[in-house]
Amino acid sequence: MRHHAWGTDPEGVYRDWLVQKCKGCEAVAEVGVFAGSTTLRLAKETEVPLIVAVDHWRGVPRDPTQAAIYRDLKKTRKLFHSRLRPWILEKRVRVLEMGSPSAAIRCHEWGIKFDLIFLDADHRYTNTRRDIRAWSGLVRPGGILCGHDIGWPGVRRAVEEELPRSWMMGSGSTWWSFIQ
Ligand SMILES: C[S@@+](CC[C@H](N)C(=O)[O-])C[C@H]1O[C@@H](n2cnc3c(N)ncnc32)[C@H](O)[C@@H]1O
């Protein structure tokens, strides 16, 4: 389901990495879930009791380079819900269908602290920086903030500026940092 234009890493490598990192976690969030391929692996291959899935299913507005990927987001949203249905029903997967900043505010209101948050939404510099700022306060001390597509210039710049000295490369174009 992943479009080749989103990254250069072979299909699945970053998902394998993320599944390993999530093992033993109590609460994780994936910001930008698209068709749910990653969320599904987290639901099936980990025992994390709470997986918060964030997407507005509007793609990346005003980014013409990604228009083809996000051609049929109604269908994508439907696919996400049909794949994740059992876990949504049992409330192990909680879907926040809204923009990333609003979802972060909602999680603050719920009083959740996450062991790990995976950022994979809008990869442009300003919005990646905004997401790092919005979500880092929701990671418990010693937890992990991470994301995909460090190869995108906007992602790299935002990560380097917001998490200087602390960020590391993971597998398959991922970046990650402990949050203190
Ligand atoms: C790269 S895809 C996510 C891929 C998914 N994490 C996976 O591994 O299969 C990016 C998704 O982020 C969503 N998105 C982009 N900007 C967003 C924002 N500001 N708030 C919420 N969702 C956003 C898009 O609708 C799209 O579905």
Image (cartoon, grey):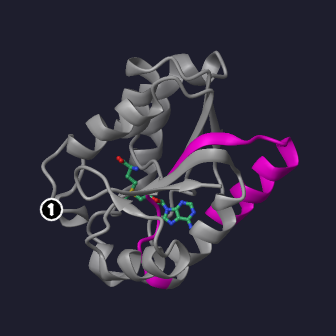
Q: Amino acid at mark 1?
A: Thr
Quick one: SS at disc 1? loop
**Is residue 67 found inside the magenta-colored segment of the image?**
no
In the rendered image, residue 39, in percent from the top left (x then y), is placed at: 44, 35
In the rendered image, residue 85, in percent from the top left (x then y), is placed at: 52, 23
Q: Is residue 144 above or below residue 175?
A: above
Q: Nearer the viewer, residue 76 or 96?
A: 96
Question: Circle 1 sits on which residue?
Answer: 8
Q: Is residue 135 visible?
A: yes
Q: Quadrant of the N terminus?
A: top left
Q: Nearer the viewer, residue 143 or 86?
A: 143
What residue range appears in magenta?
Answer: 99-125
Q: Is residue 178 above or below residue 84?
A: below
In the rendered image, residue 60, in percent from the top left (x then y), is placed at: 44, 71
Quadrant of residue 80 in the image? top left
Q: Residue at x 25, y 59 (%)?
A: 173
Q: Residue at x 41, y 72 (%)?
A: 123
Q: Nearer the viewer, residue 156 or 104?
A: 156
